[in-house]
Image (spheres, coloured by chain):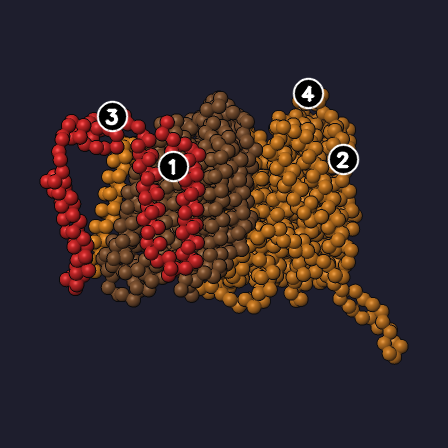
Chain colours: A red, B orange, C brown
Amino acid sequence: MSDSFLIEYLPILIFFVIAGGAAIAAVAMSYMVGQQNPDPEKNSQYECGFEAFAESRSKFDVKFYLVAILFIIFDLEIAFLFPWAIVLGDIGMFGFWSMVLFLGILTVGFVYEWKKGALDWE
Amino acid sequence: MEYIAVFAPLFAFLIAGLFGKQIGDRGAELITCSFVIAAAISSVFLFYNVILSDLENHSVMIVPVADWIVSGGFKASWTLRIDELSVVMMCVINIVSACVHVYSTGYMSHDKSRARFMAYLSLFTFAMLMLVTSDNLLQLFFGWEGVGVASYLLIGFWHHKDSANSAAIKAFVVNRIGDLGLILGIMTIFVIFGTISYDGIFSQAADKMHDSFNFFGYEIHAITLACILLFIGAMGKSAQLGLHTWLPDAMEGPTPVSALIHAATMVTAGVFLVARFSPLFEFAPEALIFVCVVGAATAFIAATIGMTQFDIKRVIAYSTMSQLGYMFFALGVSAYGAAMFHLVTHAFFKALLFLGAGSVIHAMSNEQDMRNMGGLWKKIPVTYGLMWIGGLALAGIPPLAGFYSKDIVLEAAYADYSWFGDFAFWAGIAAAFMTAFYTWRLMIMTFHGKCRAVKEVQNHIHESPRVMIYPLVILAIGAIVSGYALSSYFVGSTSYEVVEVDENGNEYIDIRNKENFWGDAIYVKEENDTIEKAHHVDMWVKILPLIMGITGIAFAYLFYMYLIRVPEIFARRFRPIYSLFYNKWFFDNIYEYIFVRNVFSFGKVFWKTGDERIINGFGPDGLAYMTNIFAKIYSKLQTGYIFHYAFVMMIGLVILVSWFFFGFSAD
Amino acid sequence: MIDLALDGYMSALPEIFLALSGLVFLIAGVFRGNSGTTFLCYSAAFAFVFSLILLAGVNTGEAFSDLFIMDDFARYIKVIILLGAIASVVYAASFLKDEQIFRFEYPVLMIFAVVGMMVMVSANDLLTVYLGLELSSLSLYVLAAIHRESIKSSEAGLKYFVLGAISSGFILFGCSLIYGFAGATNFDDISVLLSGDNSLNIGVIFGMVFILSGLAFKISAVPFHMWTPDVYEGAPTSVTAFFAIVPKIAAIALIIRILFEVFPSMSEQWQQVVVFISVASMAIGAFGAIAQKNIKRLMAYSSIGNMGYALIGVAAATQNGVYSVLVYVTIYMVMTVGVFGIIMCMRKRGYAAESISDLSGLSKNSPVMAYGMAILMFSLSGIPPMAGFFGKFMIFEAAVNAEMYILAVIGVLLSVVAAYYYLRVIKIMFFDEAEDRFDCDIAFSRRAMIAISVILIVAFIFYPNIVFDGAMSASLALFPK
């Protein structure tokens, strides 16, 4: 039983291998082919606007998080929209209006955050 | 109408009790008096509606108020049952209560907490009304305990007096013994009939008359058991022999209380209970014999004690007990109507006597010992006159009320033609003599002869204010007319003769039966109808009580007016008997010796070692100590740190999961 | 393919209406700003009332491909939830004004929380359970922390959120275990699968224990109760009132539905867990409360203890038991409304006074309030003829009928311990030296709520059948003939 059960996960393993290979290939290619002019700014880590390896209790601006969370919400919205778009032909008007409702609720949230000023940086 | 009659006293109580401070003593008096008077008036209207408006078809009203408990087969609701029996009781209660309310405004005028007193009176009135209008045993029990509580509060009203407090407690405890009987009776009835509503019980009474319980191998007739248990409850409340010791002590309460509760209403609750359960008692002949014998013995013994007492209120209290004995032996010979009749007339004249005595006490600056009175008739003539009316009624002198009712009670006892009926009759005759004797002993010692009071008291003697006299007048009217006016209804012969002409033209006498006044409220088996038989007893039986009354009065005059030495000589000559009477047949002493002392010492053992050391040590005190320690330890666990909380949650989950893992994988 | 008939959706009409009105209020609020908070509170109360009316007309049945069920049980619980929510939002209106916390999100969050709870109660699928639970929980987390300027409020919100997330994790893990071992998420399917299989699957039992633990957190049963005192104390009082009144009822209803609809075949197993949780809750509720000085903390322990009593009825695992729980939580809801109303009235010179000793001498300063509180305390400690007595009595009766004598005896004993701290409140109010008066400008709406609650508690003895009948038909819905 366990063999056939594991077989079902084979595509995921293959996916991992390909993804890993692609990533390694990309880094390796740029390392080999690209021109390199390192300077201190380029060598430092890039992380949402503040030092990655600093005192963890330092103050930082909550706006970064706000933007990140809002981003995730709309990111998830897109994640829902893709499969929906693919099967829209099968699920018909019911599916269409379901998504409209969903987007409508999201829009209410969007209006709220806009009005609250969550989108203003200053 | 029926709502006013029953609930007006409740509202009076609530208003006077809760807002006594705001509305003041005067306001409380006004409110309670007017509400109770309204109740009295509406109950008279009810009486008219239920009975007099249509003598043939009595309209029995069942007024539902609310559902109370519905639990499986058990159902109890708040219902007012307005039938002949309860409407008569309502009239008595509300009228006497109204008189007492008004009287109290005068009698208690020097007291500090009048509002509280009036509130208690109204509370009592409501509880009593609840008792008599109940449609099931639970509601009856509610009223029963309600009057018990109100009585406790009122006896102990002067709570700064030790004697009042102990009298209140005594009344409560002795009544509890009777209540135990009542509770057991209610349970027995529920076991037998499966219901506690009157209709349900009475309709099945005939079917269940052969049921019996098996009790440790003895077969016990079920209905008899239930009836005797109910009667034990009645004995407690109505101060019958054995459970009577609380009643004389209850005189520690203010006099209006004695008049309302311990003469006219609460003590008659037992009589009402037995009359209400006549459909059941009729199927329990042994229980009826028990009732009859206890009643007759009470009537006799209480009268003997009454002859020797010196406290004016105690004399009347023993007289009350004796008259209640009359009512009970009337019940015992199935003369329920006669018992109710005596109840009504007695309520009037006994309340009159009590309030009159109160008026005397008021005049004498709270002196109650008759040895310190005397010669008052000139100074308080109105009270004297009213007391005469009450005394004549009590002694059974025509045409006053007591004559009619006492007569029919005694005749009915005679007409039962049984050994216990005869016993009751002769005990009653003897008691009738003694009643007249001690009543006039009281009158003479109080009002005639030389005044034996100290000077300052003498100077203060004054007639009572009008608010106290008017209620007395109303009661006096009741004591005069109620016997004559009601006798044909309450205990009238149900058969009457009509001269008819048959087809041959000959006249003949046809005997017909008319509807009984009590309708379905009282059930009497045909062969037990002693009231009917009582109308046909020999002439000497009818006259004997009257003769006894007159000779009793004559003897009293002789002994206390003219031959003042004689009572003392008697007392010395018959020392044993006199001291037996004077010491109330040693009931209190015997109880003290057998029960009270032992119970107290028992109690002390339990209290000192049992309760304080063992139970308190391991129980409340120990537990309370442990509880506090627990609480402290626990508060320490509540650290406020979120990771501790999460840790506890995880531990809890692990415990539950492993419990299952090890607990069930084994199965 | 997909049933579009409106009938199915009609079963969820009250929830749909509430959700839509929540969205509308959110937009309205954000355009109007915080000044409209009071108005929005009353609008929310109106929305609850309207939802209650809709609820009366809704037919029973299943909807959303059997994800959602509407039966008499759900209807009864929803009525209780909505009534509690109405009381809470009315309290909030005046309380927010007193405390100058003007946040229009407050009523909106309350609406969403209530929608979540109603969905929980109607859940017929593990996914619906989680959906409703999270909707309500997330709203509640924010509500706890709504007073951002107060450190205590923020702390309460944070604690509640972190621990709540852990409990949600329990539930999700339990759901996945059950799905993994039983192969279904629908309640009907799972119960059919379980009843057919005689050998009990340890995986499913584990899943059940995890779900039960997560839900035990929501009703603050021991050992998942630690958050309760801190959150009750820290959150603004109107939020605490809401926490105490409403979500517990939804959660205990969900426990009942899951245990009796999904796992009736395993009742022997879960009975033991429930008994353990119940006894532990009663004990901690009784002993923990004694040392408390803050009245809100006291009520927190009181609610822990009361949930313990309610669980006795669940542990009985009979229809009678469910019936008694429903009666109990109904009475509990009414009592809590009254008590928190009075707690909100405890203000001295414009500031909230939350210490129990602040009540001392209340009988002299404002006797009406003192008597009301005394009645509620008597009722909470289960003294007849108050309603609380009947609740406790029926619970114990159910336990005795199920032959769980020891549990009933423990319950009675612990209720004696609990009576100690309730009666202590009365003692402080009536016999201690009077302190400063409370401010006497109490909003009419709050007075009315307290009065209604006290009257219901006292009058229950006269008309108990309204509750009894509703609870009876609700409990019968879970036990198909």
Q: Could you tell me which residue is drawn at 29 percent across and 66 percent down?
A: C196
Residue placed under numbered mark 4 in the picture: B455
Mark 2 or mark 4, earlier in chain: 4
**How much space separates mark 2 and mark 4, taking CA atoms?**
29 Å
Residue placed under numbered mark 3 in the picture: A58
| Mark 3 or mark 4, whichever is nearer to me | 3
Residue placed under numbered mark 1 in the picture: C142
Lateral position of residue C265 relative to residue B158, left or right? left
x, y (%) of residue C330?
46, 47
Chain of residue at mark 4: B
Instruction: Identify the secondary structure beneath mark 1.
Output: helix
Residue placed under numbered mark 2 in the picture: B470
**Residue type indicated by callout 1:** Val
| Mark 4 or mark 1, whichever is nearer to me | 1
Q: Are there few (<14), some (14-19), or many (20+) residues within 10 Å of tag 4?
A: few
Chain of residue at mark 3: A
Chain of residue at mark 2: B
* Residue farthest toward the bottom in the current orientation of the protein: B504
